Image (tube, coloured by chain):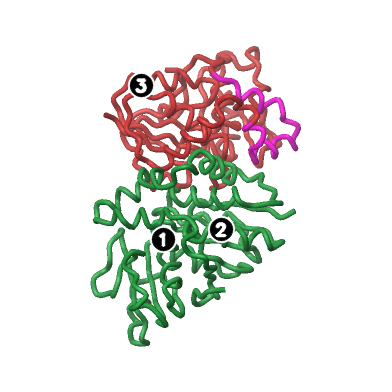
Chain colours: A red, B green
């Protein structure tokens, strides 16, 4: 029987073993939802980068460049981190570079995993299916917000756990996330709207992003990080 | 209306504002349960210290000295960190020094608070009563285990939140803890037994400590940290 653990913020990753595991990075609002949407819209690849400088340099190589800090698009970049701004006509066939406050940093940190999948509610069942069909141990990495646990990533991690078969979960964070999901699965959007980050985004006129990111299984794709870029499996 | 937040591990304390707030430190298994039991048994004071060296030096000043690392009593100290080893006959009127893996470190870090209360299930209602009768903002600090969120401290924090009146809680961790408690309040012991730390302790033959620490309101006391020692309010 395989094991599963949940790391509630990417800053705590060093407390967990991720090497050779199936890792799923989750940043529901909004990095992983946005990255999935970019690939769902036909982009060739998405390169997650940690700094704005690295991201800006990708423009010379023909990349669409996207950057967000404090929930807002950074001046000088083509896009921020909003999944509802992604149009197939603009992204199809393109390479994309993206730097966000938490999610892209989390992805980059998971090098050394067996595979790093990009998780969100949008592709929930595809993630669950992959994990159930593998015999590997699993680590779910929630991005969190500036080092603190957040509601929407914990909820999505709980949703993944709830769909698993043949896993041992004696980890405390797995029990916490699963119970949160079980209490809230009937109304994901309403709980997401209560989250601190939803309130932060509302202030930036991004209410529709929250509705978008709370949709379940609208994108049947399995994006993975190949240690440099994210592509479809 | 006052605000309440929960810091899920003491390593994350720097992400939160604790200055001038009512702070409650929680380490259900077992530091705060044990400290409360020591004072409930008539000890004069408990000094929480971070290192074994500091703790050992207190012996020369007539203190009972207690130390735990990795869940076990440290060689050379009078006691480890077990609340069921505390006898009134040995502790009444005494000063006690204690060093534990997580809880005593958490307490020492909260200097600068308006008041730091020592929380556990044993004195749950006294903690709730104090907070409800004050107009101050509140921060609950869960000790966690080696930098990771744990089940029993999150559950106890949720139990405190569930008892509060006239508080605004829009913090994500408050919502998570409250939902965990609401789902589990009928059977605190059974959830505690599922926690990783309970399994760790069972290995050290401390099953009865878990039962002891899951009791609610058996100690009507309000211990607080006066920046050096813990005493009864």
Front-lying residue, A100 or A203? A203
Q: Main secondary structure of the magenta part?
A: helix
What residue is disc 2 on? B125
Q: Are marks 3 and 1 on the same chain?
A: no
Residue B39 or residue A94, whichever sits in front: B39
Q: Are marks 2 and 1 in contact (CB under 8 Å)?
A: no
Residue A203: give x, y in percent of width and height: 75, 37
Report the residue at 38% width, 72% height from top: B98
Q: CA distance from mark 2 to mark 1?
A: 24 Å
Q: Which residues are magenta?
A: A191-216
**At numbered mark 1, what does the secondary structure look like: helix, strand or loop?**
loop
Tell me which chain the residue with mark 1 is part of.
Answer: B
Return the chain for callout 3. A
- Work out whether residue B188 or residue B224 is closer to the camera in this orientation and state it: B188
For the residues carrying marks 2 and 1, which lies nearer the camera in this image?
2
Residue A132, which numbered label? 3
Please provide percent x and percent y for residue B153.
Answer: 47, 52
- Near mark 3 (Cα within 10 A), the count class, few <14, some 14-19 or many ≥20, is some
Q: Quadrant of the C terminus of chain B?
A: bottom right
Q: Is residue A3 located in the magenta-colored stretch of the structure?
A: no
Marks 3 and 2 share the same chain? no
Q: Is residue A199 magenta?
A: yes
Disc 3 to disc 2, C-alpha distance: 44 Å
Residue drawn at x 49%, y 76% as measured from the top left? B229
Image mark for residue B102 = 1
- Are discs 2 and 1 both within one chain? yes
């Amino acid at each position: 029987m395989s094991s599963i653990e949940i790391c509630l913020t990417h800053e705590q990753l060093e407390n967990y073993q991720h090497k050779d595991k199936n890792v799923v990075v989750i940043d529901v609002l909004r990095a992983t939802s946005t990255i999935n949407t970019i690939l769902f819209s036909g982009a060739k690849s998405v390169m997650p980068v940690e700094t704005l400088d690295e991201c800006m340099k990708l423009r010379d190589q023909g990349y669409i460049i996207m950057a967000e800090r404090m929930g807002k698009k950074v001046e000088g970049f083509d896009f921020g981190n909003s999944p509802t701004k992604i149009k197939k006509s603009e992204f199809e066939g393109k390479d994309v570079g993206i730097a966000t406050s938490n999610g892209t940093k989390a992805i980059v940190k998971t090098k050394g995993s067996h595979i790093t999948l990009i998780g969100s509610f949008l592709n929930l069942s595809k993630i669950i299916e992959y994990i159930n069909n593998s015999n590997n141990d699993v680590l779910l990495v929630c991005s969190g917000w500036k080092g603190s646990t957040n509601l929407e990533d914990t909820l999505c991690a709980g949703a993944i756990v709830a769909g698993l078969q043949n896993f041992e979960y004696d980890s405390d964070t797995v029990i916490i996330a699963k119970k949160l999901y079980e209490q809230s699965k009937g109304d994901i959007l309403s709980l997401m709207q209560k989250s601190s980050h939803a309130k932060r985004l509302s202030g930036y006129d991004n209410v529709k992003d929250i509705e978008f990111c709370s949709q379940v299984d609208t994108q049947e794709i399995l994006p993975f990080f190949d240690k440099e870029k994210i592509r479809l499996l």
